[in-house]
Image (cartoon, coloured by chain):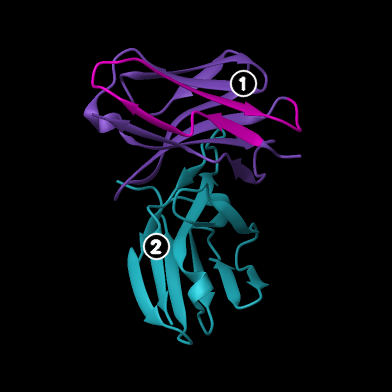
């Protein structure tokens, strides 16, 4: 059982379309991070959300942290082929004692 | 600098052979260090984490072990590899609770 459930696990869309991926848990997190990973490389941080209800924008990417700090979403507007990759959410549950856990990831393919 | 060095980058080992993956970090003292394994369909699985020299917390594996002989060195070992140990191993560091995790380049292990 994954502490962080990500959906969908796979997504294939056309260039220019919008998409949203979700990260859900029954646990409360002090913060959640979103990473993007290219094949054969380590994940790279996109954003950290800390406050319940927080919304952060990074160009065409919008990240939201749920009010109860149990879930998060990533919305991409007008997807580009360069957005292709594996998107991972990660977090440390409150009282998690430095244990950072990751979701299984959403594999996104943007077709030109 | 937030550099993390992992080696070897690629490894092919027979079943039953020993393993040693090394990770060294630069740029910070007393970091939290992590070993993750990424296998197809399994996402990033936390194997070990360490909050200081000689302090190791084990999350999952029975035939893997970790050691932290120096502040900035983290080693993943096995006495006898299993086929199921194949995967992409990632070393990561974090300065403290709530801070960003940075990943190394990863080590590909194939057990044959």
Secondary structure, mark 1, is: strand
- Locate the C terminus of chain A and report the quarter of the image it occupies: bottom left
* Chain ID of residue with mark 1: B
Residue A81 % position (x, y): 48, 76
Q: For chain B, give the colour.
A: purple
The residue drawn where x is 76% and y is 33% is B27
Q: Nearer the viewer, mark 2 or mark 1?
A: 1
Residue stretch rendered in magenta on the structure = B4-29
- The disc placed on residue B73 is 1
Label 2 with label 1: CB-CB less than 8 Å:
no
Q: Is residue B22 magenta?
A: yes
Residue B85 % position (x, y): 30, 30
**B7 left or right of A105 in image:** right
The residue closer to the viewer here, B5 or B61, is B5
Q: Is residue A60 magenta?
A: no
The residue drawn where x is 58% and y is 69% is A63
Residue B70 % position (x, y): 65, 15
Q: Which chain is drawn using cyan?
A: A
The residue closer to the viewer here, B21 or B74, is B21
The residue drawn where x is 48% and y is 34% is B9
**Residue that mark 2 sits on:** A106
**B51 left or right of A41 in image:** right
Q: Is residue A13 above or below residue B68?
A: below
């Amino acid at each position: 059982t994954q502490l962080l459930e990500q959906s969908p696990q796979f997504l294939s869309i056309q260039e220019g379309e919008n998409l949203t991926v979700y990260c859900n848990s029954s646990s409360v997190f002090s913060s959640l991070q979103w990473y993007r990973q290219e094949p054969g490389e380590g994940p790279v941080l996109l954003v950290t959300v800390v406050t319940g209800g927080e919304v952060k924008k990074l160009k065409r990417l919008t990240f939201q942290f749920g009010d109860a700090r149990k879930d998060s979403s990533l919305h991409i507007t007008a997807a580009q082929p360069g957005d292709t990759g594996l998107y991972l959410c990660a977090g440390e549950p409150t009282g998690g004692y430095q244990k950072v856990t990751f979701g299984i990831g959403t594999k996104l393919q943007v077709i030109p | 600098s937030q550099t993390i060095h992992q080696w070897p980058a690629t490894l092919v080992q027979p079943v039953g052979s020993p393993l040693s993956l090394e990770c060294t970090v630069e740029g910070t003292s007393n970091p939290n260090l992590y070993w993750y394994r990424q296998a197809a369909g399994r996402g990033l699985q936390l194997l070990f984490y360490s909050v200081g020299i000689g302090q190791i917390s084990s999350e999952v594996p029975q035939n893997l072990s970790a050691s932290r002989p120096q502040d900035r060195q983290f080693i993943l070992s096995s006495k006898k590899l299993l086929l199921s140990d194949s995967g992409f191993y990632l070393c990561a560091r974090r300065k403290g609770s709530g801070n960003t995790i940075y990943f190394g380049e990863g080590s590909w292990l194939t057990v044959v």
